[in-house]
């Protein structure tokens, strides 16, 4: 899970990148980074653990017309500064920088091949293999070098890169992760989501197409499609949970998608006896609104989320999972007391947060709790860039819906169907990856998923 940003052609490139990263913070909160190139052609990297808002002035980047940035979230084991991005390397032909969103499924094989040829790696992230491959790629235009570096790479990448004085953006041939191109005052901007264009006053031009590489430099904008075109596999979970509702991803509005998911959920899984509907904030706010609109049940704010709590603030081993839920959420007793309620969430993964929330809602006086989920049961891990646990920790991979209802302590539990979800999202139902719900993986899963997860780029 990561966010990427890149800009060419504005003297404020570094500060605009920093701003863009604020809007991509939800895509990764463990570390952030920027690489900017000064007018003299000097590249400098700034990387730090934590949030972009915690950036200190000593991290102040150079004046630059060219910069890329990255926000990163990964599994715990690989949360180190060495794995922060963008990566900056210096080869005999100059600097190469790269920021990557997605997971490569053959990174281990590619890395072994490079190590056999004498490469030494400085991180455990899959993304570094792409940098090594660019460095080894024969001379030529930057986009051609990137194309030849990416040719054997499999899996998901929406990336921004700098080779010399050229900004590059690339999306894998299946297009799992979003990437959009915009412009501001003649400068070209790339970002994972349009909310990062809005913050720098850029206007969206179009999506980077799947399988496309775009190069931007003093010679203009060039686009190539060097790879064999594959069936589209846009990640449906971007609409369900991951992207911000004020963004457009894959050309569609996340807010509209979530409301449609909520409306469809209300049609498929009504709760006619309920007095009110509320969301598990924030990612399910729009879906709960859709559910309330469709069912004509009042929408209430029954759970309040503490916005000053980051994902890594309290670890389970420090204070236990219940404490973790309580630090993040609290119930509004005045809303819940004596009420039969519909609690809408976008997904249940492990079931631990949900179980804690249901207990909290009952503790605040709710008499019936009907849980509605605006996606199908998550039954498989993601190998393409969303941080989901292994199958043994996925509650829906191991228990039936009735068993889950009992475990989380609800009076009823309803999930959106796969077809309902795929028909509700913009430009559905075809062309989406829904492997985590359906088991229908667009590529063969990696041979060593644990290793991949430990060293994942996102
Ligand atoms: P749990 O009950 O522990 O499975 O947690 C469910 C909550 O996790 C829901 O509110 C989801 O919005 C949220 N969620 C879904 N996917 C992820 C993810 N990949 N990382 C972190 N939280 C997630």
Image (cartoon, rainbow, N blue to C red):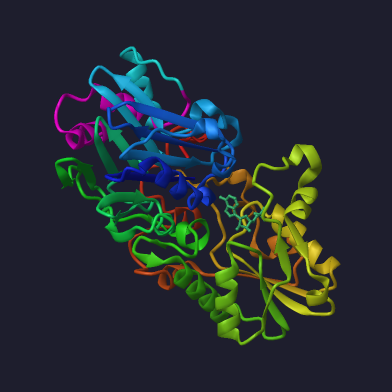
**Which residue is at the front of the view, 83 or 217?**
217
Is residue 154 at all visible to an observer of this figure? no
**Which residue is at the front of the view, 379 or 320?**
320
Q: Residue at x 57, y 37 (%)?
A: 75
Majority SS type along the magenta span:
helix
- The residue lying furthest to the top in this view is 118
Q: Is residue 291 above or below residue 122?
A: below
Q: Is residue 298 above or below residue 306?
A: below
- Image coordinates of residue 24 in percent, x first then y, are 48, 50
**Which residue is at the front of the view, 22 or 408?**
22
Q: Residue at x 61, y 35 (%)?
A: 76
In the visual, does 282 lie left or right of 329?
left
The number of numbered badges drawn on the structure is 0
- Image coordinates of residue 262 in percent, x first then y, are 54, 74
Q: Residue at x 28, y 53 (%)?
A: 208
On the image, which quarter does residue 231 sit in? Answer: bottom left
On the image, which quarter does residue 106 sit in? Answer: top left
In the visual, does 247 lie left or right of 206?
right
Residue 326 belongs to the span the image colors magenta: no
Is residue 281 at all visible to an observer of this figure? yes
In the visual, does 334 lie left or right of 86?
right
Write the start and end of the magenta stretch as one range. Answer: 123-152
Q: Quadrant of ligand 1?
A: bottom right
- Image coordinates of residue 117 in percent, x first then y, are 30, 14
- Image coordinates of residue 173 in percent, x first then y, are 27, 47
């Amino acid at each position: 899970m990561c966010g990427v940003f890149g800009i060419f052609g504005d003297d404020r490139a570094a500060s605009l990148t920093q701003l863009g990263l604020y809007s991509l913070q939800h895509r990764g909160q463990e570390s952030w980074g920027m690489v900017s190139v000064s007018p003299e052609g000097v590249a400098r990297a700034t990387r730090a653990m934590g949030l972009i808002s915690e950036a200190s002035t000593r991290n102040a980047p150079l004046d630059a017309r060219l910069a890329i940035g990255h926000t990163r979230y990964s599994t715990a084991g690989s949360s180190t500064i060495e794995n922060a991005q963008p990566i900056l390397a210096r080869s005999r032909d100059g600097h190469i920088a790269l920021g990557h969103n997605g997971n490569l499924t053959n990174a281990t094989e590619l890395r072994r091949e490079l190590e056999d040829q004498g490469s030494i790696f400085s991180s455990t992230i899959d993304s570094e293999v792409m940098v090594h491959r660019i460095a080894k790629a024969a001379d030529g235009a930057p986009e051609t070098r990137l194309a030849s570096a990416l040719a054997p790479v499999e899996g998901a990448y929406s990336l921004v890169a700098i080779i010399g004085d050229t900004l590059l953006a690339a999306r894998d041939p299946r297009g799992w992760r979003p990437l959009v191109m915009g412009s501001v005052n003649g400068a070209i901007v790339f970002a994972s989501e349009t909310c990062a264009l809005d913050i720098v006053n850029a206007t969206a031009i179009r999506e980077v197409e799947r399988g496309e590489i775009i190069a931007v430099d003093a010679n203009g904008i060039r686009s190539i499609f060097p790879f064999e075109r594959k069936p589209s596999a846009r990640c449906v979970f971007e609409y369900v949970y991951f992207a911000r509702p004020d963004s457009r991803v894959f050309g569609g509005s996340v807010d509209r998608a979530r409301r449609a998911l909520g409306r469809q959920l209300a049609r498929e899984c009504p709760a006619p006896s309920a007095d009110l509907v509320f969301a598990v904030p924030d990612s399910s706010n729009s879906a709960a609104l859709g559910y309330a609109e469709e069912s004509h049940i009042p929408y209430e704010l029954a759970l309040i989320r503490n916005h000053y709590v980051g994902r890594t603030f309290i670890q389970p081993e420090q204070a236990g999972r219940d404490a973790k839920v309580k630090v993040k959420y609290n119930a509004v007793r005045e809303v819940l007391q004596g009420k039969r309620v519909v609690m809408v969430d976008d997904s249940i993964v492990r079931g631990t947060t949900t179980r804690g929330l249901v207990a909290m809602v009952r503790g605040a006086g709710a008499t019936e709790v009907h849980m509605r989920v605006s996606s199908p049961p998550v039954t498989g891990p993601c190998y393409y860039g969303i941080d989901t646990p292994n199958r043994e920790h996925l509650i829906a991979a191991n228990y039936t819906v009735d068993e889950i209802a009992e475990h989380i302590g609800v009076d009823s539990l309803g999930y959106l169907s796969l077809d309902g979800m795929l028909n509700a999202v913009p430009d559905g139902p075809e062309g989406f990856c829904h492997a985590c719900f359906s088991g229908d993986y667009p590529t063969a899963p990696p041979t060593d998923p644990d290793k991949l997860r430990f060293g994942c780029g996102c």
